[in-house]
Amino acid sequence: MGWSLNLGKILGIDVKIHLTFFLLLIWFGFIYYSQGGLNAAVQGLLFIVLLFVCVLLHEYGHALAARRYGIATKDITLLPIGGVARLQRMPDKPLQELVVALAGPAVNVVIALLLFMTLLVSGQQNFSAAQLADPNSGLLQRLFITNIWLILFNLVPAFPMDGGRVLRSLLAMRLPYAQATQTAATIGQGMAFLFGFLGLFYNPLLIIIAFFIFLGASQEASVATMRDAMKDMPVSAAMVTEFRTLTPHATLDDAVEALLQTSQHEFPVVDPSGVRGILTRDSLIAALRKDGPQTPVSQVMTTNLPTVRASEPFEEAFRLMEEHKVLPVVGEHGQLVGLLTAENIGEMMRVNSARKR
């Protein structure tokens, strides 16, 4: 994710923090300072930092549960609105998706229980939601209340929250995946309208949340519909067959010429032994600025890309497309015969949708 600072690896997963997070700290620091001076600002910022530690642990719950099923996590990014664990793919089986979705809130349940026991032992049993807005309230009390809110909010049965995936996985145990997703998305959109309506009379923040939920539900439904429509199709039906290729010894100047003469954004790099890699437009532009036009494309191309056979079911290729924006398609003897790109798949979906009307 762009505009992110890499904090390093924890348990083999890159942890990043979006630069806008620091704007959040500045904003809350100013608010807390205006309410109670320097001490309130320090206490308030400490609360924000510890809150996002809880969010990070929540995302690790998802990541480690996914790892159990052989699904790696590319990275975890902390944003002002929460955290995002980028899994290489979603679990294929409903039970696996249920476990991965519940693992995040389960972490917050454990944190809340530990905080509650600590508060009981220390004799601080009195707390309420109103303490969240008071920078002078006890730190542990505020963290406990916030974790309860995180649990409840994440379990709202609407995408992109964990509750939406929990609902979809439960429905998918009885219904086809696409139908389960569509049903869960419809329920989520209903929740979005409810939040939006309540936001008109109570907290305007609910309107923003409603918009966020509606978009998430629509996106999930769209992806599920695409997978269902193309599950019985071979890869050859969706691949690009007319494209330019480059050799490993071609220069970036040669790649620029190909870029300007075609509408391609990805160029396979091939030699007599087969596909050596893919040069993307973004990599090309970045390398031109950094390394110059005479740099061989072999030094810039993306390597170790998986290939798919033209005769394979598209559903198998779709799982790989969740990790890679472009896939080389090979024939029976390993020769390059096509490309699978997100853009071409999108075009095919629009055509199929128009034909059904």
Image (tube, rainbow, N blue to C red):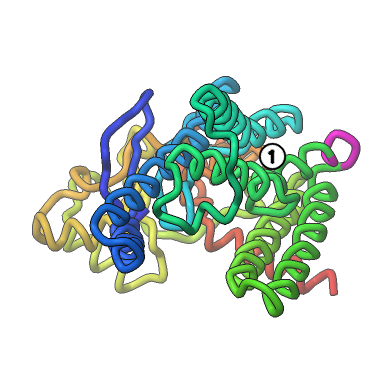
- Looking at the image, residue 58 sits to the left or right of residue 32; the answer is right
Judge by depth and name the residue closer to the eye, 73 or 222. 73
Residue 13, quarter of picture: top left
Q: Where is 120 relative to 45, above or below?
A: above
Q: Which residues are magenta?
A: 171-175
Judge by depth and name the residue closer to the eye, 217 or 210. 210
- Looking at the image, residue 128 sits to the left or right of residue 187; the answer is left
Q: Residues within 10 Å of mark 1 (few under 14, many from 20)?
A: some
Q: Quadrant of the C terminus?
A: bottom right
Residue 281 magenta: no
Judge by depth and name the residue closer to the eye, 170 or 132. 132
Residue 351 seen in render:
yes
As drawn, the residue found furthest toward the bottom would be 200
As drawn, the residue found furthest toward the right would be 174
Q: Position of residue 128 (x, y in %)?
A: 60, 48
Identify the residue under disc 1. 313
Q: Position of residue 222 (x, y in %)?
A: 70, 60
Q: Position of residue 86 (x, y in %)?
A: 48, 42
What residue sits 66% from the left and 33% below the top? 102
What residue sits 48% from the left and 30% below the top? 72
- Looking at the image, residue 96 sits to the left or right of residue 26; the answer is right
- Looking at the image, residue 308 sits to the left or right of residue 272; the answer is right
Amino acid marked by disc 1 = Pro
